[in-house]
Amino acid sequence: MSKTTITVVSSDAYHLNQITHILEQDSNLGEVRAIQGGTLELETMKDVPDVLIVNGGLPENGGLDSLERLRQRHPDAAFIIVSDNQSPDFLLRAMRAGVREVLPTPTAGIQLHAAIGRIAPKRKVQEGAAGKILAMTSCKGGSGATFLATNLAWVLASAHGKRVALIDLNLQFGDAAMYVSNQTPASNLAQVCQQIHRLDAPFLDSAMIEVAPDFRLLAAPDDPAHAADVKAEHVEAILKVARANYDFVIVDVGRSLDGVSLQPFDMADMIFPVVQLTLPFIREAKRLVQVFLSLGYPMSKVGLIVNRHQKNSDIGLQDLERTVNAKVFKAVPNCYDEVAASVNQGEPIARLAKNSPVTKALREIAASLDTVQEKNGKGWLSRLFASH
């Protein structure tokens, strides 16, 4: 396997030497090049490495625009920024430019190596993987993403006999467990991350709620303060173990965009943004899809799920696709009373209201995923979308 090539570009000689020195100590890395300069060096770069690290005030002074243009010419390159600027606005702009990691200054060697490890081998991570990772995310609060994620997991397990793991990555206010179970979680995601050195299949299984014989759920932290215990590298490790032991791993990502939430998006076979046909939802869906495009995700793995759909809506599905620049994977009809009863009772809607149009839609989604899952070989995503 070829080693990762890295180029460091910085307008600051001290930081340039510091970062380069850290990288050169790692014999597992390939060639490390150091370039002192600014946007001109980024714009004229021809020999683009596997990983490009940018530092020294450059990102804030035209560097992001240069990186975005470089990304368009070299979509396989991975970008890391090392910067004092950690504001939410800057992080969002960096993501839109295609940056995979934004590390603080000064950056320790362990942080730098961990970031490179997360982004450099992405194309190799999924080779030979068994299960499929489905990342479901809300375009806006109240979309119903958690309801759909939990109930889809239940249908895949109960009606299709698939081994399903659901991971609640809504770190601040995750409550996925209550949608399909009245059990109190004995453990949660933060506690698993605190003991990540023990991670293996039995340990992960013991931390999860058994919702049904083939359905396990890893709850979100019970205290929002413990969200800080969950790191991107922890999520990556958990998803790798889950993928190897389950047919489907469904991640309820929540609404934040940061290094932790990007990890399941990176590893996902499918990303399902959940949207409703109102302008605020559509606006947020468009912004989210733009971020996915900037990060180099193929749009073939992004499918919109329209929740609470009404056929007489002022805005149609084609209007949504045209505006957001993404395909609708499935429209789930509006059945408020049945969904509310399911949520209030903590019972899967497919068990509580077997003939509900929502149950029918969930079964159709599960059938599509199950059919494609059984067809091993190339073209998994294209076959999935060909049926819609």
Image (tube, rainbow, N blue to C red):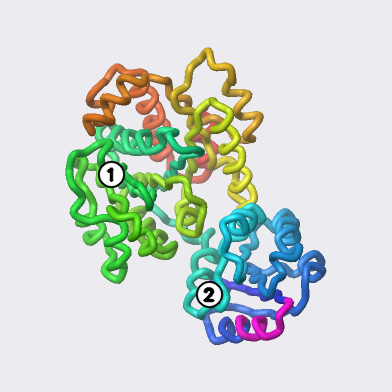
**Picture disc at residue 112:** 2
Residue 328 x, y percent position in the rendering: 54, 30
Q: Is residue 386 left or right of residue 173?
A: right
Tell which circle, 1 or 2, labels the residue nearer the N-terminal end. 2
Q: Is residue 13 magenta?
A: yes
Q: Is residue 177 left or right of residue 32?
A: left
Give the residue number, with chain letter if any, for mark 1. Answer: 163
Q: Is residue 98 above or below residue 358?
A: below
Q: Nearer the viewer, residue 303 or 273?
A: 273
Residue 233 x, y percent position in the rendering: 42, 65
Q: Residue furthest top?
A: 312
The secondary structure making up most of the magenta span is helix
Q: Is residue 206 above or below residue 180?
A: below
User: Which range is magenta?
Assistant: 11-19
State the SS at label 1: loop
- The residue under label 2 is which amino acid type? Leu
Please tell me whether mark 1 or mark 2 is closer to you in this view.
2
